[in-house]
Amino acid sequence: MLIALLASLSLLGWLTLALFNGRFWIPLLDAPAPEPKEWPDVDIIVPARNEADVLPQTLPSLLAQDYPGRWRILLIDDHSTDGTRDIALCLANEGNHSHILSVIAAPDLPQGWSGKVASMQAGVKESTAEYILFTDADIAHPPHSLRRLVARALADKLDLNSLMVKLHCQSLAEKLLIPAFVFFFAMLYPFRRANNPRSRIAAAAGGVMLVKKQALEKCGGLERIKSALIDDCALARAIKDSGGNIRLTLTRDVLSLRPYPTFASIERMIARSAFTQLHYSYLLLLGTVIGLGLLFFAPWLAFLMGEPSAAIIGLAALFSMFVLYIPSVRFYGLSWIWSLTLPLAAAVYMVATLDSAFRYLRGKGGQWKGRAQAS
């Protein structure tokens, strides 16, 4: 009886998510917009801390933008020890783009600021443009990337236009966990609801965020989110709360080149901010563990161990789960067979979330580039 009840609750949960959660399971892709007659000035701000290994693959793509207006790149060297600054300048000189790139040394980390947001702020202080594009050092952009971002922002009168880039997905660990990462993110922050001005949900993806500088100032600037570890969603929340229009979509042609070759590397990435996402609440942590168990594991329990009626309900919940996950799997070019691995991925995310809470207890939460930023 108990197993049947758990399976029924799981099935109800999946049906509710499918029908009433902003069609989160259908990827919302970016699309070109009509181009304006006049193009605003843009400053591209790239926080970089020990990125010497990836910059030769990504920085040339930014330097090769075909943006019709005035633009430049402000790379913020955040106390790197691997020659990030020299490599960036060398890459600019090799392509005769030294006039486009400025490398700025980040000041010492101010009290109360997270490392990445402080680096972003160092760039904002130097910016004189109407729009700012925040992008990570591991992101490779096609030549039309900036032009398309600005065109969409102007056409839709957006104050924040953000893209969730296509993440690296080649290793076994990545194939199991990266599509699940996008699926879980969209489940928590349905893109269509986040983009709706009438919805309370706000979300962005930190890899690519084009922000209107006037809107940034109106919402209180980066100082308002200075301690945020999940800085992208915090910025989206601040801009939306101040009356700004935001948009978040998926993209196929802007790529993250940072590999996650092992399960441990992805687990660390998840654990960095998972407990922060729960507002450091152990009550929410307990609720999350129960919710994950109910949605992802109870159907298997019913299917394998329940009475025939419970097994049928469990099978229906599993079928619903797998069908909803297929679009995310296919987005990454994987066979639909990978949709069957979602419960296993959920188990890894549960362990990483518990690890995140444990790290916070030990004063080692929010690890980013050698810094513990949540304790």
Image (cartoon, helix red, strand yellow):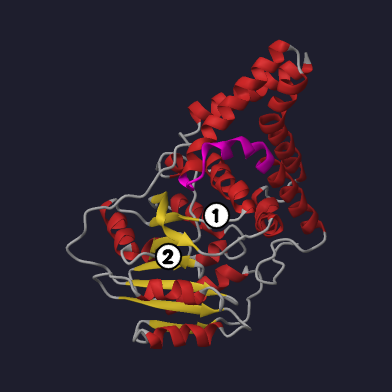
Q: Residue at x 69, y 34 (%)?
A: 291
Residue 351 x/y as whole percent: 75, 47
The residue furthest left is 37
Magenta part of the chain: 331-345
Task: Report the residue at 42% width, 40% height from top.
Answer: 192
Q: Kindly identify the amino acid type of the residue bearing the numbered disc 2.
A: Glu
**SS type, badge 2:** helix
Q: Quadrant of the N terminus?
A: top right
Q: Is residue 127 left or right of residue 154?
A: right
Q: Secondary structure at mark 1?
A: loop
Q: Main secondary structure of the magenta part?
A: helix
Marking on residue 217? 2
Q: Position of residue 133 (x, y in %)?
A: 40, 66
Residues marked 1 and 2 touching at CB (< 8 Å):
no
- Res. 302 image quadrant: top right
Q: Does 43 lie within the magenta span?
A: no
Does residue 80 lie above or below 210 as drawn?
below
Q: Is residue 121 visible?
A: no
Quadrant location, the C terminus: bottom right
Which is more N-terminal, label 2 or label 1? 1
Q: Residue at x 51, y 68 (%)?
A: 138
How many marks do you count on the picture? 2
Viewed as shown, does residue 17 lie left or right of 310?
Answer: left
Q: Does the magenta-highlighted stretch encompass residue 337?
A: yes
x 32%, y 56%: residue: 153
Give me the C-alpha separation between circle 1 and circle 2.
Answer: 37 Å
Residue 288: x, y in percent? 70, 39
* Residue 169, label in figure: 1
Q: Give residue 109's quadrant in the image.
A: bottom right
122 or 343: which is nearer to us?
Answer: 343
Q: Tag 2: Cα neighbours inside 10 Å, few (<14), some, or many (≥20)?
A: few
